[in-house]
Image: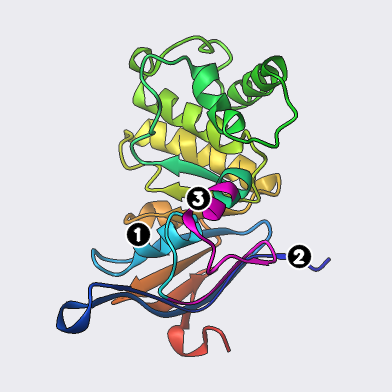
Amino acid sequence: MVKRTIIETLDLTKIYGMGEISVHALDGVSLEIKEGEFVGIMGPSGSGKSTLMHILGCLSKPTNGTYILDGEDISNLDKFDLAIIRNKKIGFIFQSYNLLPRTTAIRNVILPLMYDRESKMDIFDMEDKAIELLELVGLGDRLDHQPQELSGGQQQRVAVARALINDPVLIIADEPTGNLDSRSGNDLMNILHGLHENGATIVMVTHDPETAKNTERTIHLLDGKIDKIHENGHIKFAEIVGA
């Protein structure tokens, strides 16, 4: 069965500043990610991995180049339209969890639905779906707990449930184990593996080679370009990317 392409970028460029002080954070990045893939993005500080994540997550626009998400060219959308795409098609898992304080786990999870103006779900349906997802990540007994009443690992699992609430076509995980101890980090990776086995498309940004080994392939960036790709233990060098 031919899988549809979720992410396709062609010669993505992102330039900050102007003239002599301009910085090419991305310099001609072309890549493709199919439905159901689990892909890692790695690189040293200044390599462009955060900039690429922001563009893939519709948090930023490229200076030049093309970004096609789930068959739609979104390269030139304005901030308002990008926000709509982001809310409908992308689920985020952040290193710092980004949960609302003094707000229950259920309410944190349903937040993206409340921002979806086209949603036909009422609050009771939203809560039912949130409960189902919190049970999926093992927090069925923490539904009414606020972030300060949860461990770091539990907060990150709330964030995973929130990322899934809108049935996204793409999950972006930004250093998802960065603030977790080894046990909580392993628990989180097991959850991500379970989602992947059920068909989720996941892009994970990480600086940790051990964490990156959990992915099917890892794209290494260097100086704003794709340097190499580790795929099933083999290395495909940048010269053939996009060929």
Horizontal and vertical percent for residue 170? Answer: 60, 52
Chain-order first, disc 3 or disc 1: 1
| Distance (Cα) linking label 3 and label 1 | 11 Å
Does residue 104 lie above or below 166 as drawn? above
| Quadrant occupied by the N terminus | bottom right
Q: Residues within 10 Å of mark 2 (few under 14, many from 20)?
A: few
Gap in angstroms between the C-alphas marked 1 and 2: 27 Å
Number of the label disc, if any, that sits on residue 3: 2
Query: Please, what is the three-letter code of the amino acid marked with disc 2?
Result: Lys
Contact between marks 3 and 1 (CB within 8 A): the answer is: no
In the image, is 42 to the left or to the right of 134? left
Which amino acid type is marked by label 3? Ile
Assess whether residue 123 is covered by the magenta stretch.
no
Q: Specify whether 139 is left or right of 182.
A: right
Q: Which residues are magenta?
A: 64-84
Secondary structure under tag 1 reads helix
Circle number at residue 50? 1
Coordinates of residue 47 in the picture (x, y in percent): 29, 70
Residue 98 lies, with reference to residue 143, above or below; the image says below
Which one is closest to the eye, mark 1 or mark 2?
A: 1
The structure residue drawn at horizontal position 56% and vertical position 84%, both measured from the top left corner, is 242
Residue 90 in the image: above or below residue 18: above
User: As rendered, which of 189 and 170 lies closer to the eye?
Assistant: 170
Residue 172 is labelled as: 3
Categorize mark 1 by other alpha carbons within 10 Å: few (<14), some (14-19), many (20+).
some
Nearer to me, 1 or 64: 64
Decide which of 66, 129 is in the foreground and name it: 66
Report the amino acid beneath label 1.
Ser
Q: Secondary structure at mark 3?
A: strand
Residue farthest along the left direction in this orientation: 20
Quarter of the rendering occupied by the C terminus: bottom right
